């Protein structure tokens, strides 16, 4: 299934979850994330009602890339997989996952690292390779490695687990949920990538 879409996805979406890993002083444009539902789509413009209730017009850059997410399971996470895990610190220590994205093999290494994330206050995003995955009493705990470091993250039962899937512009319908890494431009938000939910699957990141 990924044979035809992966070259474009790797080029266009390798930075999908890595924008926050780039220090502000190194960025050419300030980047932020738009999460919400599509109001309208037309050519190079996407109108979105954000989760904060604001309606924004997003300009789609030349050559912009589109993908969706498909449901996966915590049991799909295997040693050697490259994953993106949004998490929060747990009261008892360590981190607890808010969501998990299993990258297709060709996207291994995209945005590797652990850095602040804006899914929830105090959340972080860790893009890393699974060193081991152990089933525990409360869901699954994975040990991931990045840049020579290791981090243990608990994945409670019910945590959304997804992977990258194909999408077409026909999926950009009113009401569809999107996740958009955008740049702040003079004319408003500018996007090079869009991740859209379809078939009832919502981009959880």
Image (spheres, helix red, strand yellow):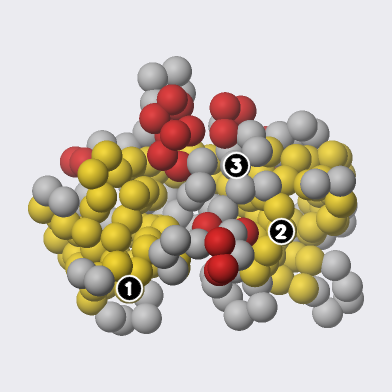
Q: Residue 157 location in percent, x, y?
A: 70, 57
Q: Which mark is residue 50?
A: 1
Cα–Cα gap, marks 3 and 2: 12 Å
Q: Residue at x 39, y 43 (%)?
A: 68
Q: Residue 90 location in percent, x, y?
A: 80, 74
In this picture, is 176 found above or below 120? above
Q: Residue 119 location in percent, x, y?
A: 54, 70
Dots 3 and 2: beta carbons under 8 Å? no
Quadrant of the image occupied by residue 58: bottom left
Q: Residue at x 11, y 53 (%)?
A: 42
Q: Which mark is residue 110?
A: 3
Q: Which mark is residue 114?
A: 2
Q: Nearer the viewer, residue 11 or 127?
A: 11
Residue 18 visible from this viewpoint? yes
Between circles 1 and 3, the one closer to the viewer is: 3
The secondary element bearing badge 1 is classed as: strand
View extreme (left): residue: 42
In this picture, is 55 found above or below 25? below
Which mark is first along the chain, 1 or 2? 1
The secondary element bearing badge 3 is classed as: loop
């Amino acid at each position: 299934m990924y044979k035809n879409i992966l070259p474009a996805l790797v080029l266009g979406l390798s930075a999908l979850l890595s924008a926050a890993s780039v220090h502000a002083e190194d960025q050419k444009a300030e980047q932020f994330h738009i999460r919400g539902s599509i109001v309208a789509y037309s050519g190079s413009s996407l109108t979105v009602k954000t989760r904060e209730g604001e309606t924004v017009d997003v300009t789609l850059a030349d050559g912009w890339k589109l993908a969706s997410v498909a449901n996966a399971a915590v049991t799909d996470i295997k040693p050697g997989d490259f994953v993106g895990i949004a998490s929060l610190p747990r009261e008892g220590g360590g981190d607890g996952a808010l969501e998990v994205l299993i990258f297709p093999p060709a996207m291994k290494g995209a945005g590797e690292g652990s850095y602040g994330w804006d899914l929830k206050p105090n959340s972080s995003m860790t893009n890393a390779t699974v060193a081991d995955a152990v089933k525990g009493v409360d869901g699954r705990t994975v040990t991931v490695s990045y840049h020579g470091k290791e981090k243990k993250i608990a994945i409670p039962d019910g945590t959304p687990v997804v992977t990258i899937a194909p999408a077409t512009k026909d999926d950009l319908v009113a009401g569809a949920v999107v996740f958009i890494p955008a740049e702040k431009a003079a004319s408003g938000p500018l996007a090079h990538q869009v991740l859209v939910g379809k078939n009832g699957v919502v981009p959880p990141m």
